[in-house]
Amino acid sequence: MSVTTLASEVVSLPSATGTEPDSEIVERATALRALIREHAEQGNREGRVVPAVIDALAGQGLLSLTVPGRYGGAETNSRTTVDVLAALAQADGSTGWSAMLLNIGNWFATTWPVRAQDEIWGEDPASRCCVVLAPSAKGRRVEGGWVVSGRWPYASGSYAASHAIMGFLAPEEDGGAGHALAVLHPGEWTIERSWFPIGMRATGSDTVVAEEVFVPDHRVQHFDDLVKGDYATELRDREPRANAAFLPAGTVIFGGIQIGLGRAALEHSLERMRAKGVVGTAYTQTRNSPVHQVAVAQAMSKVDAAELLAHRACRDVDEAALRGEYPAELARARVRHDVGHIVTLVQEAVDALLKAAGSSSFMETSRLARLFQDVGMAGSHVHATPGIAADVYGKLLLGADGPLPLHV
């Protein structure tokens, strides 16, 4: 299949990616674990994934997973993306998180008109988009577009991005303000250092700043349209990924980070517990302690269950996209609820492992303590928190009166 874009003549399109993972791409992520771990502590000190790791990810195509094939991207499905993110997060949560936000920022950009996409990737296929959906800025209408000014905190991966997709309040004729998103080009935004957390320290989730930037109409979409799947791209009938549900595709990815962190905690705990004893007891080897045997078995089961939920959610998103159907609200809410439950399962697993591994695991130098902080921090994102997801899903299951408290 081929199409004509504004950036070039006829280019080839990849065939539909289906719903199964691309194992070769996932293996590329797995192969980088040693390098990622080698630089993780430096990243934690500097507050960002170090350039050597970003370059390695880009060199393996892991920061262009969601870029359309017409620009040389992998155009992967949700399942492949989630499995890659889990593999990266198993080496370092911040690296996985940064790759997650850059890849989803790129995918969000594919919902814009081809003209806007060409401006991002037409001349430089290595361009990357960071994203903050929250409308942390104001815009004013001018001829041909909008003038936008604002500050957007928590812009993960912004240091490694060329473009920024930022939310803003767009005044409407009735005096209200709608939620819109603007694509900002290089040179139209700067970064202010503001990210000093106790977990996920190297995500570089700093503040993007823009002052009086003109954004033409073709680089603006309204959030409500995106939530409904009313995308501006002209290629929905030709590119399966252009049919994926906006918020579900942007939510299931958080499950990949949790799964990777859970796997890392299991890997570290099993190795540690096989080599130590249980002080003050007759168990000279922890591996022979029934209490610890049960703890690791239950933790393993929780992480496995989390992975199964993530894969089901990916299948829901990918199958609907391949059919060219936009999932109903209840199906979209289930994806969000699945991710919330993934957070709960992994947090419970890591908490149990931390306690089973002994008091030294609570030291600042402990890898398990760092994983515990990363799991908690990653699970606090609004798109991952379990409570509100369960509330929305339950409302829809029961047919409760009134509007939902958030979009799904």
Image (spheres, rainbow, N blue to C red):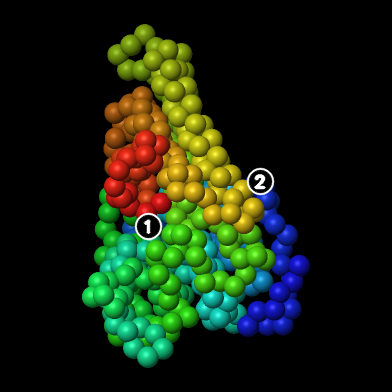
Query: From what the image shows, is residue 229 above or below residue 375?
Result: below
Q: Is residue 181 above or below residue 90?
A: below
Relative depth, front residue between 97 and 151: 151
- Would you say residue 367 is visible in this rendering? no
Q: Amino acid at mark 2?
A: Glu
Q: Residue at x 71, y 74 (%)?
A: 3
Q: Which mark is residue 20?
A: 2
Counting residues from the start of the chain, the first of labels 1 and 2 encountered is 2
Residue at 71% from the left image edge and 67% from the top image edge: 13
Q: Residue at x 45, y 17 (%)?
A: 293
45 up-or-down from 140: above or below: above
* Residue 249 - label: none
Q: Residue furthest right?
A: 1
Question: Which residue: 59% across, 50% down?
Answer: 320
- Which residue has dot 1 on it? 202
Q: Which quadrant of the structure image shows residue 375?
A: top left
C-alpha distance separating marks 1 and 2: 31 Å
For residue 238, side relative to residue 363 (left or right): right
Residue at the extreme left of the image, as rendered? 175
Image location of residue 81, percent across then percent down:
56, 52
Q: Alpha-carbon neighbours of circle 1 within 10 Å: few (<14), some, or many (≥20)?
A: many
- Tell which residue pokes out farthest to the top in this image: 282
Looking at numbered disc 1 in the image, what kind of residue is underneath it?
Ala
Report the front residue among 331 and 44: 331
- From the top left corner, tell me how far across and down residue 316 is, in percent: 56, 45
